[in-house]
Image: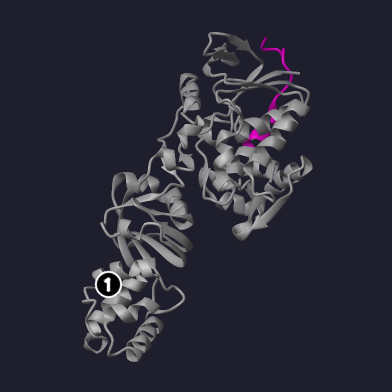
Amino acid sequence: MSKVLIVGGGAAGMFASVFAAKHGHEVHVFEKNEKLGKKLYITGKGRCNLTNACDVSELLNAVMSNPKFLYSAFYGYTNWDTIDFFESIGVKTKVERGNRVFPVSDHSSEIIGAMERRMKMEGVKIHLGTQVMELVTEGGQARGILLKNGQVISGDCVIIATGGFSYQATGSTGDGYEFAKRAGHKVTELVPSLVPMETKEAYIPLLQGLSLKNVTLTIKDGKKTLYEEFGEMMFTHFGVTGPLVLTASASLSRKLEKKPLQGYVDLKPALSREQLDDRILRDFEEGKNKQFKNVIHGLLPAKFLPVIIELSKIPPEKKIHEISREERAGLLELLKAFPFTITGTRDFNEAIITKGGIKVSEVNPSTMESKLIKRLFFIGEVLDLDAVTGGFNLQIAWSTAYAAAQAIEGGEQDER
């Protein structure tokens, strides 16, 4: 039996504590917040998208950074194992669009409550409002932790589950990166991911609050297409957000640190350019003696009209029969490729996750143990692992936590 010290009481830390305690270890969780699972509470807009009900191979496809590192962890503890676990502790689950798995109750508090009850049932000792300041290592091995009050807690192994840099109001302030660096680990560049994007044009804030469904978002660097997906997005006072934009940020946030990119929205993806031109011609024929501003409303949401009219450069009072073929072609292009310039992303406070973290080449992918310091483990978002939206990032937390908990051996072995 080992004395296991887990730093961080979020998703990964709570999960690891349950499985480590199940194996008979003495487990202590140290959480600097006044309650467990503070970031988990707000995930999925407070509904907690806890995993994704896809094939295990698809889990790896959803990972943006270092997917190969997760092969062993994902197959060692799958998304289906996750669903079974939560069902077994009383959380009924359901599958929604995109294979996203949620609790039937739609409340993340149910996930946290059920895990906390299971932790207590397994004998996990929870230390809330307790900040860890340092790792204690000796002879190339983790020996314990130093608390803010100066107390040193000895242990047989230490699991770092401190999360990333995102949603810093929940306590994700990068403590784990500092622990890792002091232990000799490298931390890759940290950037916000699954994060809204900022735009340059003055007309975008005029569309604030407008949500678009069934559109195609394309993002380009010059002529090169970097991202193209169909789905939902929304305009804000600073730029764009929503599922399409957050997913795009997972692959483009680093590039946006270096240069702006061009965004285009196809507002009518179900229609080819020819079909859309036919539709516009029909509308124009029906209203040929009306003013442009009074005919275009059938094509777009009301909030969009002033912006499209402005960008089309067709005077709003102009009679339909006076509109030239070139003007109509310009309108068509706006509807098929509504343009804006993406200047960057929002900061870590609005990012769902952090891209970057502890270099995974210095961590054993089967056990999550440091290759530099024995009995020091890293799990969850503190590692350089991130995925797109849809429950995949939480699955990284569950799978890496399980791998570490399974790898802990008894204390007082030959190193001592």
Q: Relative to residue 328, is residue 368 depicted above or below?
A: above
10 Å crowding of disc 1: few (<14), some (14-19), many (20+)? some
Q: x, y percentage for residue 359? A: 49, 33
Question: Could you tell whether 24 is left or right of 333 in the image?
Answer: right
Does residue 406 show up? no
Question: Could you tell whether 263 is left or right of 41 in the image?
Answer: left
Of residues 402 and 335, which is closer to you in this image?
A: 335
Residue span colored magenta? 400-416
Mark 1 secondary-structure assignment: helix
Q: Relative to residue 238, is residue 270 depicted above or below?
A: below
Q: Quadrant of residue 254?
A: top left
Q: x, y percentage for residue 351? A: 45, 42
Q: Which residue is mark 1?
A: 309
**Residue type (three-letter) at the residue carrying disc 1:** Ile
Of residues 413 and 179, which is closer to you in this image?
A: 179
Q: x, y percentage for residue 300? A: 39, 73
